[in-house]
Amino acid sequence: MVSTGDERRPKATGRQPRPPDVGRLRHHLEAYMTRKGLRSTEQRRLIVDTFFGTPEHVTLDGLLERVRAIDSRIGYAPVYRTMKMLSDGGVAHEQKFGDGLTRYELADGDAHHDHLICMDCGRIQEFEEPQIEQLQERVAARYGFEVHHHKHELYGRCGACAARLGRLR
């Protein structure tokens, strides 16, 4: 048998994560705002709509840039307050990937995924791996532990950066 060098590398069984259910999250947000007596201002709607339309993990500065492309009058404070409201309301997850920045993504528990973070270029790849999820459930059951949520982050070098450095195997 000729060695291809891939024998030790497990086959990828994961799949692309399901997209968040934006309609359900919008409904959840409306209910949260009603319960808390929060108003839906024009600025807040624009910030929320822009965030909901952003497919990648976005920083406050990145979101502010997108919002200002539509309405240059919006400042940092309304974006910050809106994202705080979305996080508190369970509609956005705050993610910290070790680079000092806080990024946000839609928080749909039914569209759970994990992250591969490139420490060179900062690329964040979402993935879903059923075997990891099953193993986590078995470990929790073995210890009589009830998991409410979790996050799984792998830090390293993406394929493009590894190839650029000549380190891809």
Image (tube, rainbow, N blue to C red):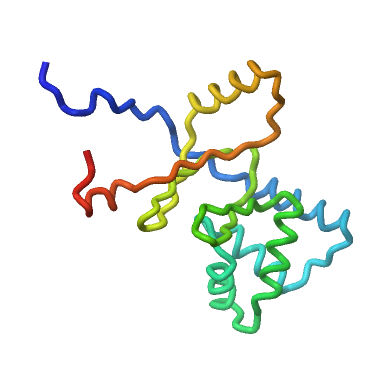
Vertical placement of residue 45 versus 27, above or below: below
Q: Residue furthest left?
A: 2
Q: Quadrant of the N terminus?
A: top left
Q: Is residue 84 left or right of residue 22?
A: right
Q: Position of residue 135 (x, y in %)?
A: 53, 22
Q: Say which of 116 and 54 sits in front.
A: 116
Q: Residue furthest bottom?
A: 73
Locate residue 38: give its quadrant. Answer: bottom right
Q: Say which of 153 and 62 sits in front.
A: 153
> Residue at the spot x=79%, y=67% of the render?
40
Vertical placement of residue 167 versus 41, above or below: above
Q: Is residue 116 left or right of residue 94?
A: left
Q: Position of residue 123 (x, y in %)?
A: 41, 54
Vertical placement of residue 122 versus 62, above or below: above
Locate residue 120: give its quadrant. Answer: bottom left
Locate residue 121: give its quadrant. Answer: bottom left
Q: Position of residue 26 (x, y in %)?
A: 71, 53
Q: Say which of 162 and 14 sits in front.
A: 162
Q: Say which of 38 and 137 sits in front.
A: 137
Q: Position of residue 12 (x, y in %)?
A: 36, 30
> Residue at the spot x=62%, y=37% of the render?
150
Q: Quadrant of the C terminus?
A: top left
> Residue at the spot x=43%, y=31% of the render?
14
Q: Is residue 145 left or right of residue 154?
A: right
Q: How many marks?
A: 0
> Residue at the spot x=64%, y=63% of the render?
49
